[in-house]
Amino acid sequence: MGVMKLFSSDSRDCPGTERVIEKMIRVNSTPDPTKFTVKRKEVIRGYPILLINYPDVKNYEGNKILMFPKFFDVGENTRRIDPHFFTNGDSPIARFEPTKFGWEMARILAENLP
């Protein structure tokens, strides 16, 4: 019969007993749709893409990339732009992470929509 090895003598097999526990605190920073600055705007095939900064928002320094429906008149909505999705009104059709990658994803989507 063979011999079974129940315990290892190698320290790599036994992680340290200390555990670091981090507590994440979520900051509630709902954007005020009346307080914003449009930092960048591009219209591709009729789809407006906006980089908007909401100064009271903490995550991503308040920046959001929003895409609106085809031929949506962004000029009409200079007083209020809500980044949340809803069924009536001026809801965006897509939202992207506010990075170069997110902007490129928005462009690719607009180029490929009907």
Image (cartoon, helix red, strand yellow):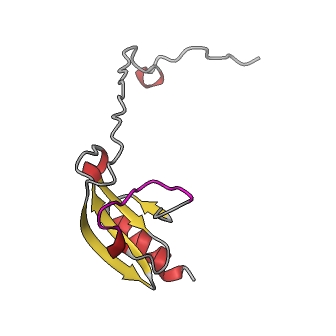
Quarter of the rendering occupied by the N terminus: top right
The percent coordinates of residue 5 (x first, y second) are 61, 17
Which residue is at 48% across, 62% downward?
Answer: 91
Which residue is at 49% across, 78% downward?
Answer: 70
The percent coordinates of residue 68 (x first, y second) are 45, 70
Which residue is at 57% across, 83% downward?
Answer: 114
The percent coordinates of residue 106 (x first, y second) are 43, 71
Q: Main secondary structure of the magenta part?
A: loop
In the image, the segment drawn in magenta is: 77-87
**Residue 67 in the image: above or below residue 13:** below
**Residue 34 in the image: above or below residue 105:** above
Which residue is at 54% across, 60% downward?
Answer: 88
Q: Looking at the picture, tell me which residue is in the foreground, 16 or 77.
A: 77
**Residue 112 in the image: above or below residue 95:** below
Q: Is residue 5 left or right of residue 24?
A: right
Magenta includes 7?
Answer: no
**Residue 13 in the image: above or below residue 66:** above
Q: Looking at the picture, tell me which residue is in the foreground, 95 or 36.
A: 36
